[in-house]
Image (cartoon, rainbow, N blue to C red):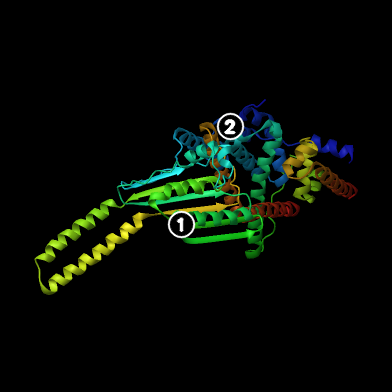
Amino acid sequence: MRSSLADAAERHLDDVYRYVLYLTRDPHAAEDLVAETFERALRLWHRFDPARGSECTWLCQIARTAALDHLRAEDRRRRREARYANLADTTSELEPETLSPWLRQALASLSAADREVIVLRVILDLGPTDAGRVLGISPSACTTRLSRALQRLEEKVGSQLVA
Amino acid sequence: MSPDLVTALRAETPSASGDLRQRVAAITATTPPTRRFTLRRLLPVAVPVAAGLSLAVALAVGLNTAIKPPTGDEGSTGSAVAREVAPPAQSEAEKRPMPLGSAGADDATASQQRAAAPTPSAGRAQDYRATLTLLVDSTSDLSTTTQKALRTARRLGGYVVSVDYETPQPTDGVANVRLRIPVSRVQAAIVEFSGLGRILAQNTQIADLQQGLDQLTRQIRALEQLAAGTRGAERRRVLDQIAALRNQRAETRRQAAFATVDLNLTTHEPEEVAPPAGRFDRALSDAVGILVAELVIVAYALIVASPLLILLLAAFFGSRAYRRHADQRLLERA
């Protein structure tokens, strides 16, 4: 049954926030993107069809579009600044208090693509079908991508613990 | 995958701040903007409306045709022209070729039926034209019948204007004969000709020439009176005019003295003419015809536009694939 967007926001705000935060690694940008996500969701709420996916999946799809727009803009900005001012990467990282240092460092060493599949499958606990729908890939491809991402994360965590 | 790692990941899940919760609550509490009129919303309405309109047009055309009475053979008949088109003979007696020399009750009956052509007026000059289309059995009968027709015309005091005899195939042939028959005997001629084969069509046209003759006579008399009162060159000019008018009058009288009979003999069996359709059948036929025409137009438009549509679809899917690939590369870098 279809509920209101306010109810959906109440239930899935943390999920959307975690997803965007893992994707961008920037808490301030994540908050802005979450707000933008719900603004877009308000405009598109009439299109939401529960038969085609859960509320969380639908909101994550919108959040991914907003996050990709943000990442594209950030990428252009970084390249422009690197070209003209030879500045270092100014991407901020997750706030120290949000994650353990070892996990934060390990996640920072992964690509956004790996972090994205980890947060969808492990943190938000979406199934391969729903996660694949968010990522625009098949469930089997999603499973494969998760397996490789976790393998890389384990390697990073293991090497940090050894160090 | 290590269970400890999953447990660690799930244990350290950041939550949205209170400030963000208030922002989102404020957003979701607002009224959603009014929905715009987009193509996606237009299509589900436009397609049934277009289909309904085309169906309505087809029904309207079909009903309009059904209401109108069927238009018959509207021959244009002037004041001085009478036209009669006889239907093909239907009775078995008429279908059988009748020998010319035969006599008896059957022949008399058939002759009465055959003599359905209007009789030329005895007291008036008329241009009488008759056309008979007859079916004969074979090409050998075609030759014999043509000879009989020519002999009949000569016997009745007429003559042959032209004969066009053609047998493109051994079993198929046509003979078109134009005859001039004295008007006083044209009825008898038509009766005899109609016995040469099965009548497929008969057409008679009578145009009155008497008014023209009377007019010429009045002009001649007036000029004769004028000639009596003139002398010299003027008189010669008037007399020339009188001579020309007399020639014209004589030509008209010769034309009126003989009737033109076109005799078309054929071995080709005419195709069965379908009975006229009823109102419902005509309405249905016209409605279906309109629908077919609309479908043809739509199919034509699709065929013409299909290369462009394919290009557009290819561009759409290509750009989407490229965007996905670019997004993936961006995520790999980020």
Please tell me whether mark 2 sits on a helix, a strand or a loop. helix
Q: B265 or A130, which is in the foreground?
A: B265
Please name the residue shown 52% across and 42% down the image: B88
Residue B56 spot, x, y in % from top left: 50, 35
| Residue carrying label 1 | B179
Q: Which label was assigned to residue A55? A: none
Instruction: Answer few, some or many: residues within 10 Å of disc 1's Cα (few below 14, many 20 plus, some between 14 and 19).
Output: many
Q: Is residue A104 left or right of residue B232?
A: right
Rendered location of residue B87, percent (x, y): 49, 41
Q: Residues within 10 Å of mark 2 (few under 14, many from 20)?
A: many
Q: Quadrant of residue B241?
A: bottom left
Residue A95 in sight:
no
Looking at the picture, how far across and down is residue B287, in whole percent? 53, 37
Q: Secondary structure at mark 1?
A: strand
Query: What residue is drawn where x is 41% and y is 50%?
Result: B185
Q: Mark 2 sits on what residue?
A: B28
Q: Is residue B246 left or right of residue B318?
A: left
Nearer the observer, B102 or A71: B102
Q: In the figure, residue B326 lies in which quadrant?
A: bottom right
User: Residue reaching furthest top?
Assistant: A1
* Callout 1 amino acid: Leu
Q: How far across and how far down the image is residue B307, in percent? A: 63, 56
Chain letter for mark 1, please.
Answer: B
Three-letter amino acid code at disc 2?
A: Thr
Q: Chain of mark 2?
A: B
Distance in Å between CA atoms under marks 2 and 1: 100 Å
Kindly indicate whether the residue at mark 1 contacts the one at mark 2 (C-beta within 8 angstroms).
no
